[in-house]
Amino acid sequence: MNTLTLYIPREGLKHQTGHSHPESPDRLNAILSLLQKSPFMALPQIEATEAELHWIKRAHDPRYLERLEEMVPDYGQTYLDNDTVLSPGSWAAALTAAGAVCQAVEDVTSGKTMRAFCAVRPPGHHAFPDHGEGFCLLNNIVIGALHAQSLGCARIAIVDFDVHHGNGSDAMTRIHDNIFYASTHQCPLYPGTGHAKDNIPNRILNIPMKAGDGSLPFRQVYEQRILPAVRHFQPDLLMISAGFDAHKDDPLAQMELETADFAWITAELAKLARECCRGKLVSALEGGYNLAALSDSVAAHLKALMD
Ligand SMILES: [Zn+2]
């Protein structure tokens, strides 16, 4: 069994968001450059294929999927909302991003690999059943979680350390059984949701953080609240919405984490997966908009997943 396998659909490069958009193909190029270096070049890499539509329909309203496909332009760009761009390659990129997470789930649950990292774009955690927003078209992580359940993995825990609240993932978790969603996110910040008052025991654990909080409060929140809650939930599979925009150099937020914090939380989550679910862990990229910080943070994340 491989310890860590990478799922990297190059189709993601064809989702063109236009000049100066922070969620750009250069993010994936930065990760591809990193993966040409030691020790990552030795990791098995899989070029994923598109998710089947009926897998995606477990999470999304079919009318939204029809509308989204129809809105994709033949040339140039259109806008799903002020921030969320569609280009001719966006539909195939979105299907392949979801497909990568589903394939990772299949390979982890079948025992081909213990852990998986999916370098996907567009990201997913702001996508709702009936609409996309915040750079996200399809909710890759929840589509993957529901795919895992279809394969007999009953209980799925999703831990989301992206600096933004995964409002789409939170909304989807509320309507599907046996999924646990935990998020740390800067508040106030887009999308303005994820308040502690909306938490549901053993199901939704949102922990808003303040701008400038930095490493210590972040680690304390995981040690004292999120890791014990995941342990209590006893998942059959642990999934990570791995956004790296809480990094101190990120242009979209001010949570002031260091690269070492991503190494730390990844190692803690890998340890917890070993404890709860024989190590089974699937991580999918969400945000991270400073290219150097993204590359460094993904390197730290992967090193911790290789151990
Ligand atoms: Zn984010």
Image (cartoon, rainbow, N blue to C red):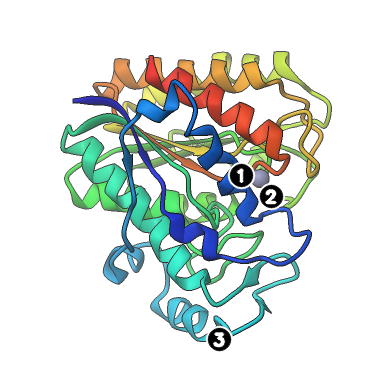
> Viewed as shown, does residue 126 lie left or right of 201?
right
Residues 279 and 184: in front is 279
> Viewed as shown, does residue 93 lie left or right of 165?
left
Which circle marks residue 193 in the picture?
Answer: 2
Which circle marks residue 198 in the picture?
Answer: 1
Q: Quadrant of ligand 1?
A: top right
Q: CA distance from mark 2 to mark 3?
A: 34 Å
Q: Pinpoint residue 248: horizontal percent, then vertical percent.
A: 78, 28
Q: Residues within 10 Å of mark 1 (few under 14, many from 20)?
A: few
Q: Pinpoint residue 21: horizontal percent, then vertical percent.
A: 74, 59
> Viewed as shown, does residue 191 lie left or right of 69?
right
Residues at badges 2 and 3 in contact (C-beta under 8 Å)?
no
* Occupied quadrant, residue 297: top right
Q: Is residue 176 visible?
A: no
Q: Is residue 263 visible?
A: yes
Regarding mark 3 in the picture, which secondary structure is present there?
A: loop
Regarding mark 2 in the picture, which secondary structure is present there?
A: loop
| Amino acid, disc 1 | Asp
Q: Residue at the location (48% across, 50% down)?
A: 120
Regarding mark 1 in the picture, which secondary structure is present there?
A: helix
Of discs 3 and 1, which sits in the foreground? Answer: 3
Q: Which residue is mark 3?
A: 74
Q: CA distance from mark 3 to mark 1?
A: 41 Å
| Amino acid, disc 3 | Asp
Q: Residue at the location (78% across, 32% down)?
A: 249
Q: Pinpoint residue 215: horizontal percent, then vertical percent.
A: 71, 17
Q: Residues within 10 Å of mark 3 (few under 14, many from 20)?
A: few
Q: CA distance from mark 1 to mark 2?
A: 9 Å
Residues 219 and 27: in front is 27
Q: Pinpoint residue 6: horizontal percent, then vertical percent.
A: 37, 38
| Amino acid, disc 2 | Thr
